[in-house]
Image (tube, rainbow, N blue to C red):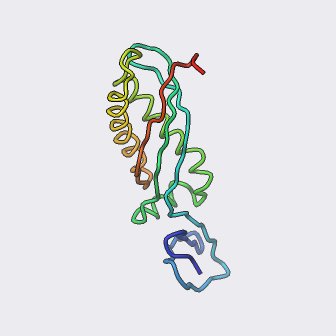
Amino acid sequence: MLPVGVNQRVVTVFGRPKIFEPGLNFKNPLSTPYYFDMRLQKITTKVPVKTKDGVEHVMDLEVQYRIDEENLMKIYENSNGNWATFAKRQVPLLIEDASTITMARNLTSQNISDDTLLRVQDFLHEAIAGRFKIYGLVVEEVKVNNVRPVDAP
């Protein structure tokens, strides 16, 4: 029995995937289940970025995301059924890629203010959401907690 709203299960029988809905389902002994956590996920990371003027900074970033239920089969295919490993490897790379490009285009070492960071945060949300959407993930929130030069503590 699958709890509603927490896990979703894709089951393969002879390599053909099928989504099982929450509730009571009959188990085929030849099937292989793959579980996906449908709750809101949060990743906090430090991303090395360069500003427009070439100064290296570290950005403390928090991203909240979830699996889009409508794209569960897409996520199954992208992760080969191993969602936990996929999330650990791919999600930070997607965040770093989007952050590096956004920071290089929008920030100089001279204009790091609260207003500028809010604007950059909006750009980041858009960039990260675009990359996550390809994999069937939905970004709920992006928060820039701090941007500091590499040599600062």
- Quadrant containing the C terminus is top right
Residue 52: give x, y in percent of width and height.
Answer: 38, 18
Residue 10 sits above or below residue 86 on the image: below
- Quadrant containing the N terminus is bottom right
Quadrant hosting residue 105: top left
Question: Which residue sits at x=52%, y=50%?
Answer: 42
Quadrant hosting residue 117: top left
Residue 108 sits above or below residue 59 on the image: above
The front one of 48 and 90 is 48
Question: Which residue sits at x=37%, y=39%?
Answer: 127
Question: Which residue sits at x=61%, y=58%?
Answer: 82
Residue 133 sits above or below residue 113 on the image: below
Q: Residue furthest front?
A: 114
Query: Viewed as shown, does residue 48 lie left or right of 119?
Result: right
The front one of 6 and 85 is 6
Residue 147: give x, y in percent of width and height.
Answer: 47, 26
Residue 66: give x, y in percent of width and height.
Answer: 46, 57
Query: How many numbered marks appear?
Result: 0
Query: Viewed as shown, does residue 70 lie left or right of 151?
Result: left
The front one of 49 and 148 is 148
The front one of 35 and 18 is 35
Quadrant hosting residue 126: top left
